[in-house]
Image (cartoon, rainbow, N blue to C red):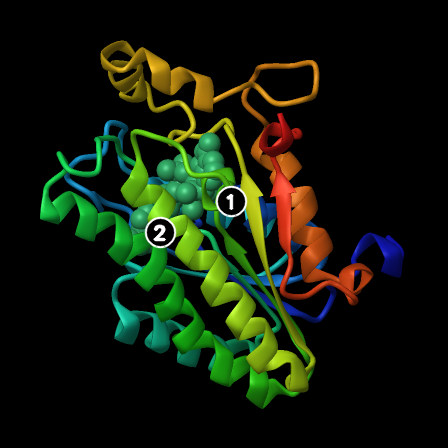
Amino acid sequence: MTDSDTPLAGRVAYVTGAARGQGRSHCVRLARAGADIVAIDACGPVAEHNGYAHARPEHLAETTSLVEGEGRTILATEVDVRDLEGQQRVVAEAIEQFGRLDVVVANAGVLNWGRLWEISAQQWQEIIDTNLTGVWNTVKATVPAIIDAGNGGSIITISSAAGIKAVPGCGHYCASKFGIVGLTNSLAIELGEYGIRVNSVHPYGTDTPMGNDVSMYQMFADHQRFIHSFSPGALPTDSLAAPDLVSDIVVWLAGDGSSLVTAAQIPAEKGYLKV
Ligand SMILES: NC(=O)c1ccc[n+]([C@@H]2O[C@H](COP(=O)([O-])OP(=O)(O)OC[C@H]3O[C@@H](n4cnc5c(N)ncnc54)[C@H](O)[C@@H]3O)[C@@H](O)[C@H]2O)c1
């Protein structure tokens, strides 16, 4: 194995929502690129109105064995991103174990459906608390450790195509994902002097439990005009994207090959935003 096979060797990456889906894929791919992994996930129900099954502890255990299969070390903990002190405890343990933190992937997120004036205050708050405040909690918990390590770094927030183009039927989700863009770009400017880059990634339909959430079809059945907001994109396929393809972008942003890129919104959506 050459240095170019493991561009992240010696670095440590913190990934939220790591039990399954895109978060698991990011853990495995960052490990394959040489990084040790700090992984958290709630591993349980996070939003009452979700139309798809929640992750379970055995999913995080599977992520752990996949990362170990790549020959890297992983510290995996069941923590909800809404729990700031929990995240701070994990970061403290990670610094004790690994001595540094270089990369953060703020990936944990939830999605459910309903028109903005019809969802309950609880449904609104559950999405905002995980998708936006959860990302801020991750920033608050990790940034001091990255600055202290003094090696620069890369923070990657996972927004959505719905964080650039608002769609109907999940306005609370769009609001949370647009919010991530503002947080990302402010943070990028604040952290520039430390050589720490901050960028957001914007996936579209991705092949995960969230991406396969069939509860959206009821929304389309009730409001057929909404379907026009969800085109398949520019590339000649209407299938869901493999999480590994989003990880290609995450690994690139984590490494030195993207050293000129900060305060940027990186699409992972097959041109959907331009169609
Ligand atoms: N799948 C898609 O089509 C799609 C499209 C655009 C953006 N995204 C975004 O990508 C990210 C990853 O989603 P995914 O598709 O892998 O979904 P997923 O549901 O398969 O995985 C999400 C993971 O995050 C965890 N999680 C959720 N809330 C949490 C919380 N409060 N605390 C800790 N962990 C929590 C879940 O337990 C789960 O393991 C999300 O931010 C999502 O909004 C997904």
* Front in this rendered view, residue 105 or 127: 127
Gap in angstroms between the C-alphas marked 2 and 1: 11 Å
Residue at x-position 30% and y-position 39%: 171
Residue at x-position 68% and y-position 46%: 249
Q: Which residue is mark 1?
A: 164
Q: Residue furthest front?
A: 225
Residue at x-position 87% and y-position 56%: 4
- Which of marks 1 and 2 precedes in the sequence? 1
Of the residues shown, which amino acid type is indicated by label 1?
Answer: Ile
Whole-percent x and y of residue 262? 68, 66
**Image side of residue 258 versus residue 216, left or right:** right
**Image side of residue 71 versus residue 205, left or right:** right
Q: Judge the density around disc 2: few (<14), some (14-19), many (≥20) Cα neighbours within 10 Å.
A: many
Q: Which residue is mark 2?
A: 176
Under tag 1, what secondary structure? loop
* Front in this rendered view, residue 54 or 198: 198
